[in-house]
Amino acid sequence: MVKLVLVLGDQLTDTLSALRAADRARDLVVMAEVPDEASYVPHHPKKIAFFFAAMRKFAARLEGDGWRVAYTRFNDPHNTGSIPGELMRRAKQEGTSELLATQPGEWRLIEALDAMPLKLETLPDDRFFCTGTRFADWAKGRKTLRMEHFYREMRRESGFLMDGDKPEGGKWNFDHDNRKPAKDDLFRQRPPHFEPDEVSEEVLTLVERHFPHNFGDLRPFWLATDRKGARQALSHFIRHALPDFGTYQDAMLQRDKFLYHAVISPYLNTGLLTAREVCQAAEDAYRAGDVPINSAEGFIRQILGWREFIRGVYFLEGPDYPRRNRLNHRRKLPAMYWGGETRMNCMAHAVGQTQTDAYAHHIQRLMVTGNFALLAGVDPGQVHEWYLSVYADAVEWVEAPNTVGMSQFADGGVVGSKPYVSSGAYINRMSDYCGDCHYRVKDRKGERACPFNLLYWHFLNRHRDRFEGNPRMAQMYRTWDRMDECHRDTVLAEGDALLDRLGKGGVV
Ligand code: FAD
Ligand code: DLZ
Ligand code: SF4
């Protein structure tokens, strides 16, 4: 019997397990642009266009390789609107009830496929280094899950940056060398921009017509939408940015959105690039003497360590994970996240480039937009929905543990051992934002005090019961307790007033 072979928008890899298991001469690949996927959160228009264009080109490539592909376009009058709907329609057309799928990267779709009246065979997604079972074995019996321990096992198992059974360069982690602020440099290379071709242009017109009100600029559209472009972006990064990636990983600059970052997460997460080839390219550059160890290790750790760890957590913790709210935060996400007015220069820049490019790098996501939402006590569900919407690389398995876990501590400490909170001092050290800000980063109270300074202590004070006993936070509480009581009262009262203003929709 013919089998339907489902290929989702983030499964655009020709070695996908479902394709490997299928019979090219007999089976039918099903791909579909559907309103359910395109609007379950208000995705950034660039993200929708990126997924649709990449899907169309991947389908054409499969057809060129001899596959039969049933591809549903978004505005096809027969489009049923959902992945299960399209599968049932194709099953009826083909007179089949058999479905082959690689495990979707989201619980929502796993559950939807399980509920279908088709004979479903789900295969593991072996584009990742670590399977769900392997992660569960590693996690079993551990009181806490720490990325660093997991990462070392992944290094040993994969053989990346190993010198026999020892880590290359004598250390597992070179993060200590990776904390430098960056300076403006007109000659720093930017990631390559890809002119939309005919296929992409058609998709851009479609997105313009159907998603006119979604937050974010569709044009100029510069992402690669096929494997060739994604490979070019990777080579460009390895050659021009990787050598300095480690040293300036945490830096932020007003006039440079990308610095030395790879800007390859959309390509990795859709499957246009594989994690293995990306790590291999970084290791090769190191072995050739083109890249120092702190950068090669720092970069490989992001992929082999963080990316795999995050995925393991998502599937280990179960479908309720994105809805967790251990700190019981209830505030509505402020309008500034959707482009509303703000006097905070760091927020304006992080949100501004999110709006124009559907991209912000890790430290902007974690220590600016994430830090502010956490300090202000925003509902983590709303924060999760925002991150899932606005970035071209956002798919739930990677977005949710980063947001709900790492950034908002709403999982109570599964991903991180303490909340990532900081006052303005951190942002001032790592960026050039503060010099041009309405607020004064050195002011700890008063009209112009940096909101991060006020809310940092407000957060620690209101969550004292939970965090005081955390050895990694004890020093912060000692510092707070040593402050003059009158000063503390003022800081808390001004923090209250700021939150009140935020709650009433006022500009902060
Ligand atoms: P680089 O800084 O150049 O890093 C190289 C690669 O390492 C990335 O492409 C990515 O694949 C991987 N990587 C780095 N950090 C992480 C991490 N913490 N988790 C998983 N992979 C990582 N990443 C996503 O891919 N999708 C998301 O939806 C997403 N949401 C995030 C939400 C929050 C609140 C935070 C704090 C982080 C999030 N990240 C997400 C992780 C990280 O910010 C992005 O992977 C990174 O910014 C992508 O840009 P880049 O390719 O230039 O990365
Ligand atoms: C992100 C996205 C969008 C915008 N649209 C589609 C789509 O129309 N069809 C599809 O198969 N996939 C799409 N995707 C990616 C899916 O949402 C992704 O495959 C699931 O979230 C599982 O990770
Ligand atoms: Fe951000 Fe505060 Fe610096 Fe302004 S002063 S840019 S609000 S950290």
Image (cartoon, grey):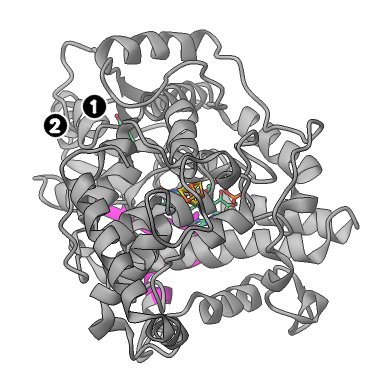
Q: Residue at x 42, y 86 (%)?
A: 482
- Vertical relation: 38 (above or below) 237: above
Q: Secondary structure at mark 1?
A: loop
Q: What type is the residue that disc 2 sits on?
A: Gly
Mark 1 vs ligand 2: CB under 8 Å?
Answer: yes
Q: Residue at x 51, y 7 (%)?
A: 198
Regarding residue 313, the answer to whether it shows in the image is yes
Left/right placement of residue 193 relative to residue 466 reads right
Rendering coords of residue 189 (x, y %): 76, 33
Is 417 magenta? The answer is no
Regarding residue 109, the answer to whether it shows in the image is no
Q: Residue furthest right?
A: 289
Residue corresponding to mark 2: 85
Rendering coords of residue 407 (x, y %): 38, 61
Left/right placement of residue 389 relative to residue 200 reads left
Left/right placement of residue 349 relative to residue 48 reads right
Rendering coords of residue 68 (x, y %): 38, 25
Residue 92 marker: none
* Segment colored magenta: 121-135
Left/right placement of residue 176 relative to residue 219 reads right
Mark-to-mark CA distance, 1 and 2: 9 Å
Q: Do tag 1 and tag 2 residues touch (Cβ < 8 Å)?
A: yes
Is 131 magenta? The answer is yes
Q: What type is the residue that disc 1 sits on?
A: Val
**Quarter in which the N terminus is drawn:** top left
- Vertical relation: 410 (above or below) 264: below
Q: Residue at x 38, y 25 (%)?
A: 216
**Quarter in which the C terminus is drawn:** top left
Rendering coords of residue 485 (x, y %): 32, 80
Residue corresponding to mark 1: 34
